[in-house]
Image (cartoon, rainbow, N blue to C red):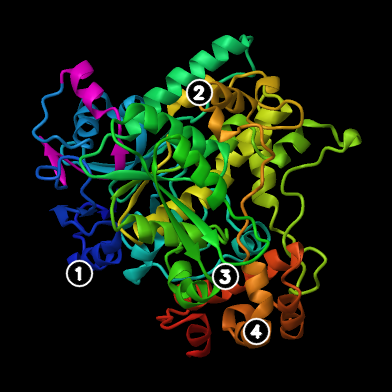
Amino acid sequence: MCGIAGMALASGRAPDLSLLEQMTQALGHRGPDGHGHHVSGPVALSHTRLAIIDLAGGDQPLFAGPAALVGNGEVYNYRELRAENALVCSTGSDCEPPLHLWRRDGLRFIEQLRGMYAIAIHDKAARQVVLARDPFGIKPLYVAPVPGGMAFASQPAALLSTGLVQPKIRAEAREELLQLQFTTGAETIFDGIQRLLPGEAMVLGDGSVLERARRAALPEGGPEAVTEEEALARFGAAFRESVDLHQRSDVPYGMFLSGGTDSAAVLAMMARLNDHPVLAYTAGFDVPGSVDERERAAHVAKAAGARHETITVSEAEVWRHLPEIVACMDDPAADYAIIPTWFLARRAREEVKVVLSGEGGDELLGGYGRHRSAMRPWWLGGKAMRAHGAFDRLDVLREEPRLWRDGIAAAEAAAATPGRTRLQAAQALDIADWLPNDLLTKLDRCLMAHGVEGRVPFLDEGVARACWRLPDAMKVRDGRGKWLLRQWLAREFPASDPFAKKQGFTVPVGAWIARAADRLAPLVAAQPGVAEIARPDRILPLFRAAAGKREGFAAWNLLFWALWHARHVEGRRMEGDVFEALAAR
């Protein structure tokens, strides 16, 4: 897990090294263990390192003949790639095999990589720069046209730091964020900055895009005939291999443990594969009556023989740190789970540099209620996913959002490929945008803010092959999602009580906002980013009603937007607690 940045300009142009340094500094939190750069002709690459594998010899850039590479993330099958391809490597780095494979196979090199990665390769002989991102979009990579060519970086903030791209907001993306809590597709909220899509590879030459390719995360085809025993055996073998690969590390690692089935499965497999107690972290809240997973997590941890560490996220701590939590979300995802994730990462960093987490289980195995609803035709109560936005019928915004669902509609059409069931189409829709642009962005930014690498063993090609083409009834049965995973846990780790009713993960931010409404609402209403989109007289009533579910979501989204806009558009430093940061102008 690191930060990468660079420029690929037209022939005869030279990169401005002061701009490269600005991008490097903007990514310093992603790589506190060192930095390096490569400059050759019109191309410059930069790297900030979080040392996880080959601590002594894995500094980047890496070189092979006329080619240089910088990478972010982990290529988990690096040992197998070396052995199977008889590669002669000069370091133990997991990122060196892709460099040799590029030189031999061209763009086909991405087909052999198993892991989470964002890679940039400069091939001086070919006069090309190659950018590549992993199929699930676990690791981020952004590109922007700049005078004379293209710039790229692990985060939009690095591109904005150069001044070559201005923080101009796309109105349709702002609508998406307010209504959905995330934005969709290749276009970001910043005009002129694009995401490399999950699985995409891009070849740059003479300052422009020469070629694009894309590697799919999901296998082709609809459900296939398989018995329950075959399915359980296939999943168990694939999941074991994935967790084993995800534990490859030269530094200490642990895991995030909730009260749900996904993290329980990760814990169960980690406990089986390790000869020492797994270190597990769980967060809870200090609000009476709120969903608190600590008791159930403690029971599961004890059954697995894990060392269990818990933290309490208090209202006072949230108000104290919320400006810096929101500040780390430069590609905005207004998921309130950023709050406990940030605090868990801060705690975990005291002991580990790598954390395994359960993201992806719901998406691959049909775990959400919206998946079950999407399985039914409309006349039986089924409905399209994300059909309603957070501000619908609340009369808070100056203008009714009209464009916010265009990106989701396009993704729906792309997800409904021939042969897929309604359930698969719903899963594919979540995997296309919700997963990379909300859940994985949250995990990446909140952990990297503390120099911690997040790993997600459900999001592995072997696990996807084992799960994706299962019959719908092996994913959803008796009104429950993730049926196969529950069955596997019932056999392998019954103490996790896998058929218990799903609680759902909530953060009591609505109750906190309601209690602070009289102080907080006027500050939010006065923010330039809020004043241009919301009716100021409606914000205080909304915040006072934030203990309600719908009002709470909308109030949180508006508070997030106020803080985010102040930091990433207005460029304010946002020092102090949430009240001080919003009051300072």
Q: Which amino acid, mark 4?
A: Ala
Residue 492: assigned label: 2
* Residue indicated by mark 4: 525
Q: CA distance from mark 1 to mark 4?
A: 38 Å
Residue pictured at 72% horizontal, 41% vertical: 370
Q: Is residue 327 left or right of residue 229?
A: left
Circle 4 crowding by C-alpha within 10 Å: few under 14, some 14–19, many from 20: many
Circle 1 crowding by C-alpha within 10 Å: few under 14, some 14–19, many from 20: few
First in residue order: circle 3 vs circle 1: 1
Q: CA distance from mark 3 to mark 1?
A: 32 Å
* Residue indicated by mark 3: 560
Give coordinates of residue 77: x percent, y percent.
Answer: 29, 27
Residue pictured at 47% horizontal, 45% vertical: 257
First in residue order: circle 2 vs circle 1: 1
Q: CA distance from mark 2 to mark 1?
A: 55 Å
Secondary structure type for disc 3: helix
